[in-house]
Image (cartoon, rainbow, N blue to C red):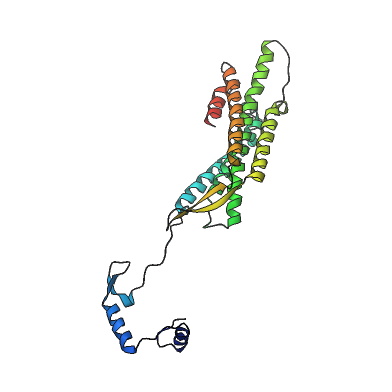
Amino acid sequence: MEWSYTDPQAASIASGLGWVTPPASVVDIALEKIQDIQCRDEKGRAVSAINYVPEPYRVDMNYITDSLRAAAWTLGSIILGASILFVVWVYVWRDSRVVKASQPGFLVMTCVGTITMGSAIFPLGIDDRIASQRGCDIACTSWVWLLPIGFCIVFSALFSKIWRLNMLIRHARSFKRLKVGATDVLGPFVLLLVINISLLIAWTIVDPLRWHRIDDGEFSSYGVCKSDNTAWVYFLVSLVGVNFVALVAAVVEAYKARNVSMEFSESTFIGFAIISL
């Protein structure tokens, strides 16, 4: 409700507060003086102060732009689509000599890992412009889970492939008969997966990532995934350390298989893939 100096209710409140109502002649003179004052509107035009409407109070929230989100989610969709397509291709050609030699189970496992890692792109594109506080908190936690778990699956598939090959070649050179199935070399995968999940569970319980909006000046703020304490540093270092040690072990296995016939070994390509991880 707008009150003017002639509003009876406004006059009653002013009188109760001890204010003195100025004479109408004084008010008229004041209005004339205000009308003589020139202001600039948002387009730079000169307007009378009595007709001036100030610009609305704006705060730059630094949201993720729609174009950036669309680009990131498009790339994520390409990763997921390509991985699913490769899974279908492996299934269709599973009986061919080349696919059998490449061990279809590990190929599918690699694709599952890339799907998991690629899925981490989507929660990274969520902020409080398109989601609630709880939704943002879930997004902050989910990408931390998806990335290391996806890495673990991809890495373990590549490592198990080349470790199995090295075991077969090592026993063949010593003229020993050995049958090594795919399940016989999944021990490192299970161990690494259990360690990663244990660390992630502990991180989520002790010091989870949450969505915070931080003021960056009087008219600016930004959102970020952030833990409330510093325990996250220890969990992050532990995750990186465990996976780095496993990565070094895989590189060593790839180096051991460097001289195996290219017809039966992809050690060179697997080595490049492991290093790129």
In the displayed structure, does residue 108 sit left or right of residue 226?
A: right
Would you place residue 220 above or below residue 14 in this image?
A: above
Q: Residue 164, image x and y in percent?
A: 66, 23
Question: Which quarter of the rendered picture does the C terminus lie within?
Answer: top right
Q: Nearer the viewer, residue 51 or 9?
A: 9
Please state if 264 lies on the left or on the right of 6 as rendered.
right
How many numbered markers are drawn?
0
The residue drawn where x is 62% and y is 42% is: 145
Residue 261 in view in this figure: no
Image coords of residue 49 (percent x, y): 31, 75
Q: Is residue 47 above or below residue 236?
A: below
Indicate the position of residue 1 as horizontal and vertical percent values.
Answer: 47, 81
Spot the residue most to the top: 174
Q: Quadrant of residue 88?
A: top right
Query: Would you identify the image quadrant in which residue 196 lies?
Result: top right
Relative depth, front residue between 264 and 49: 49
Residue lying at the far front of the rendered structure: 18
Q: Where's residue 151, x and y in %?
A: 60, 35
Residue 16 in sight: yes
Q: Residue at x 57, y 44 (%)?
A: 120
Q: Is residue 73 above or below residue 40?
A: above
Between 71 and 8, which is closer to the camera in this rendering?
A: 8
Q: Residue at x 69, y 14 (%)?
A: 171
